Image (cartoon, helix red, strand yellow):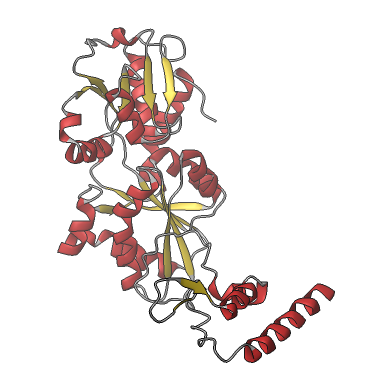
Amino acid sequence: MIEILRRYSLITLLVIFNFTVSAAALPLESVTDKAKTALISKEGSEQHQETVIMKWWKLLLDLPLLAGWNKQSDDIYEPSFSTQSKSKAPKYIIGIHPLHNPKRLFEVYGPIVDFLNANMPEADFTLEASRNYEEFDRKLYGGHFDFAMPNPYQTVNSLKHGYRVFGKMADDDDFRGIILVRRDSGINTVADLKGKAVSYPAPTALAATMMPQYYLHTHGIDINRDIENRYVGSQESSIINVLRGHVAAGATWPVPWKTFSKENPRLADQLEVKWQTEPLQNNGWVVRKDLPTAVIDKFAALLFGLAKHEQGRAMLARIPVTRFDPANDDSYEPVQAFIATFIKTVRPLE
């Protein structure tokens, strides 16, 4: 309290001093003009000097009360896709599993969230990215997301954490694992990978990790002894690790590989898809069971209707996927069967 009174007394004295300073001094520039040093020009001289008044005002601006007027916000910028103010509308968080790095994910899925906001004034949707699979899993299994698009393994697990399936990506034939090698690698058979390193996005990535590891297992590779498994954090990283020669092979799935090939054709030409797995059900859409039915139904209708208009088809092409389809918990029974086989024959899952 004494410190506050001392500072305010100083402010009062400085204000009085401001009005009693020599009348010859030039008027003070606006205090809120970014608090920059005021310069005056003496007629016929190129020399500039700071006014006495401005020196005192700079001192004032260093005090907490006035410094706040010019302080810029330290808030971290987060992309927002709301097209209008919805401060009074219920807020819902949408989570997409780490198909891409956060920047790319916002570029791909942001327009869809923007579309949902524009067509559902009764709700306020926010897209939230996760840095890696571990962070996404923690949020999903903790009930942080209201709506989410997990991979099929995460979809199955989410059913134990208060979610239910209401939709999924179409194009199941694209949900398969692919194993890339450099064209100049000299690797021709699966056996050639023995003693070498293979990259994957994360231990719990179904198409890009578990399915390729099961493929290697069924083709004579003990993935726990014959090769070094490197979990590199993202689909793009797995591809780049092969390109740079850090690993002999890298696993991913068709969607990020198509995107990488389109955006980096000369680099992609240095790689080839050496092996691919059988497909499974594509990524799911889940929702927390405690959300209002009307909100879920309208969200689902807008999502499933994207393929019916030009604007929506353009959004889907960025993913790329042809459409989203209705689904339910039973749609993922084949995934549950695969996971049980994988745990029994390949490796445990945490």
Residue drawn 79% across the image and 77% down it: 6
Regarding residue 175, the answer to whether it shows in the image is yes
Q: Nearer the viewer, residue 85 or 33?
A: 33
Q: Quadrant of residue 203?
A: top left
Quadrant position of the N terminus in the picture: bottom right
Q: Nearer the viewer, residue 271 or 137?
A: 271
Q: Against 311, is 322 above or below?
A: above
Regarding residue 309, the answer to whether it shows in the image is no
Q: Nearer the viewer, residue 349 or 290?
A: 349
Q: Position of residue 8 (x, y in %)?
A: 74, 81
Give the total number of marks visible in the rendering: 0
Residue drawn 46% across the image and 14% down it: 224
Q: Nearer the viewer, residue 67 or 40?
A: 40
Quadrant position of the C terminus in the picture: top right
Q: Position of residue 233 (x, y in %)?
A: 43, 34
Task: Tell which residue pokes out farthest to the right in this image.
Answer: 2
Task: Tell which residue pokes out farthest to the front in this image.
Answer: 44
Q: Against 343, is 159 above or below?
A: below
Q: Quadrant of residue 254?
A: top left
Q: Position of residue 96 (x, y in %)?
A: 40, 50
Q: Position of residue 152 (x, y in %)?
A: 39, 40
Q: Quadrant of residue 230?
A: top left
Residue drawn 44% across the image and 19% down it: 346
Left or right: 345 as drawn, with respect to 320? right
